[in-house]
Image (cartoon, rainbow, N blue to C red):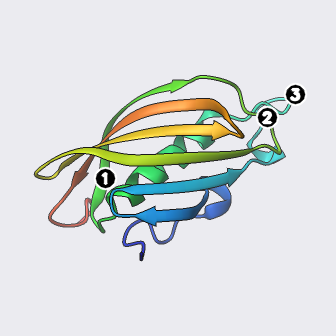
Amino acid sequence: MEIFTHQSIDPALCGRPVTLEEGFSRVELKTTAQMAVDSSGLIHGGFIFGLADYAAMIAVNHPHVVLGAAEVKFVKPVKAGQTVSVEAKVVFKDGKKHQVAVTGRRADETVFQGDFTCFVLGKHVLG
């Protein structure tokens, strides 16, 4: 399946898609030392959120999808060098509104959970 949104995103920052089906995506991010906030290697949550947001966007997979709201939980910390895999599934659609459930894992351990409200606009948000 072809990706129709966020085509210029940097996979080194927001992850690489590994699975894409209608209403579902799986994206993986190999974290790096540049993403860490301190000498212990703790990854800044913004990188994990960006990964989850990207997975939600391509699960909807429309050229004009935007994020309207998100309710998220950072369940466990991520350390530089670890790979996080995020799965996003569209669980509800009502017109232009799509609810997407997102779960992030490191191996078999959940590190992130979120509910994303996405909207499909009639034109580009900056248009």
Where residue 51 appears, as percent x and y from the top left, is 55, 48
11 vs 67: above or below: below
Judging by the rendered image, the residue that carries numbered circle 1 is 66
Task: State yes or no: discs 2 and 1 in contact (Cβ < 8 Å).
Answer: no
Amino acid type of the residue tagged 1 in the rendering = Val
Q: Of discs 2 and 1, which sits in the foreground?
A: 2
Judging by the rendered image, the residue that carries numbered circle 2 is 79
Residue ID at (41%, 50%): 56
Amino acid type of the residue tagged 3 in the rendering = Ser
Q: What whole-number distance in Å separates the C-alpha atoms at marks 2 and 3?
A: 8 Å
Upstream in the sequence, badge 2 or badge 3? 3
Where residue 45 appears, as percent x and y from the top left, is 62, 33
Q: Residue furthest front?
A: 108
Of helix, strand and loop, which one carries label 1? Answer: strand
Of helix, strand and loop, which one carries label 3? Answer: loop
Packing grade of label 1 (10 A; few <14, some 14-19, many >=20) is many
111 vs 33: above or below: above
Judging by the rendered image, the residue that carries numbered circle 3 is 40
Task: State yes or no: discs 2 and 3 in contact (Cβ < 8 Å).
Answer: yes
